Amino acid sequence: MEMPRLSQLMDLGGKVAIVTGAAMGIGQGIAMRLAEAGASVLITDIDIKAARQTVDQITKAGGKAEAIQADAASVSDAERVAQTAVTTFGRLDILVNNAGIYPPSALMQISEAMWDKVLDINLKGLFFYAQAAARKMIEAGRGGKIVNIASAGAIIPTGNLAHYEASKGGVVAVTRALAKELGPHQILVNSIAPGGVPTPGGAAAAAMIRAELNLPEDAMPPPRSVLGHWGTPDDIAKVVCFLVSGLADYMTGSLVMVDGGFLLI
Ligand code: NAD
């Protein structure tokens, strides 16, 4: 049997992907690269205006994308999004569960409401989006790929993020559970743990570090990376492309660190 070329394995032409929270930050980077690889991308976000701007950027670059307003914490939105992918683009092959929040708070100030909000978006919603996507993938019988965005914080705490770190530890565990039960359907499920990536969502955390280190307001906090610089959304996006491509057809249940050596410091 002739082996496919590497370029064929990386080609996502004809595939359909959902990326949650893809209006900005890491999710936007992921949506742009998946579209470049040939996938039709359904961008979900609570900020529909920004999501549409990302669609415009993708379309201008020659890619295919649509936006839908949906809450990553909502179980009914999970069903609606999976159905919309199939109705709009005809099938569903890839889900990237990227949406997540990380409001920094000292341990003793974390309220029940804040705990619930973080866990609902980062963990509960992620599970139900995976369940809804897997239902479509199983119905179609073509398998699929799910990538869950965890965090280096799932492995070691950075401080002031206990609720977030609990949610991301859960993401790693639920990724393995999904991989185990969905494996027989050829649905491969992996997670990525980014290190520090400056994004709109990171502004509050950056401000807290600046205050701790007595840095001026416009200063970038020093990167936690052995490479000496912060990561970018595209650093994460490229690894998502690898995981959902034909290059990673025997990987499931893995946690891939994309952290510039965050854990080595
Ligand atoms: P961001 O805040 O810059 O972007 C997140 C996007 O998600 C925004 O477009 C926002 O509108 C959307 N969003 C927020 N709540 C939502 C909800 N309930 N429903 C739908 N969309 C919602 O964040 P980011 O830094 O790009 O982070 C993306 C993911 O990467 C998160 O899961 C985060 O935990 C993870 N992560 C980020 C870093 C980092 O340093 N930036 C590090 C590790 C992990």
Image (cartoon, rainbow, N blue to C red):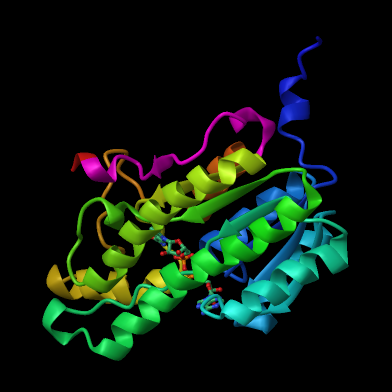
Q: Quadrant of residue 150?
A: bottom left
Q: Is residue 247 magenta?
A: yes
Q: On the rendered structure, is 44 left or right of 142?
A: left
| Along the viewing direction, whichever of 264 and 100 lies nearer the viewer | 100
Q: Nearer the viewer, residue 50 or 178?
A: 178
| Residue 84 point in image, percent of width and height | 79, 71
The residue most toward the top is 1
Q: Position of residue 85 (x, y in %)?
A: 78, 65
Q: Quadrant of residue 54?
A: bottom right
Q: Is residue 216 above or below residue 240?
A: below
Q: Is residue 174 visible?
A: yes
Q: Residue at x 21, y 53 (%)?
A: 156
Whether residue 161 is visible: no
Would residue 251 be found to the left or right of residue 89 on screen? left
Which residue does the image show at 71% across and 22% down from the upper left? 6
- Please state the horizontal and vertical placement of residue 250, each as a whole percent of the image: 57, 29
Residue 147 drawn at (x, y percent):
55, 50
Tally the numbered discs. 0
Would residue 54 appear left or right of 155 to someone viewing this image?
A: right
- Residue under the point 68% across and 83% down: 49
Quarter of the image for residue 40 reads bottom right
Name the one closer to the observer, 47 or 112. Answer: 112
Residue 249 covered by magenta stretch = yes
Residue located at (83% from left, 42% from top): 13
What residue span does the magenta drawing correspond to? 244-263
- Rendered-image quadrant of the C terminus: top left
Q: Considering depth in this image, is 228 or 137 the residue closer to the camera? A: 137
- For the N terminus, the image quarter is top right
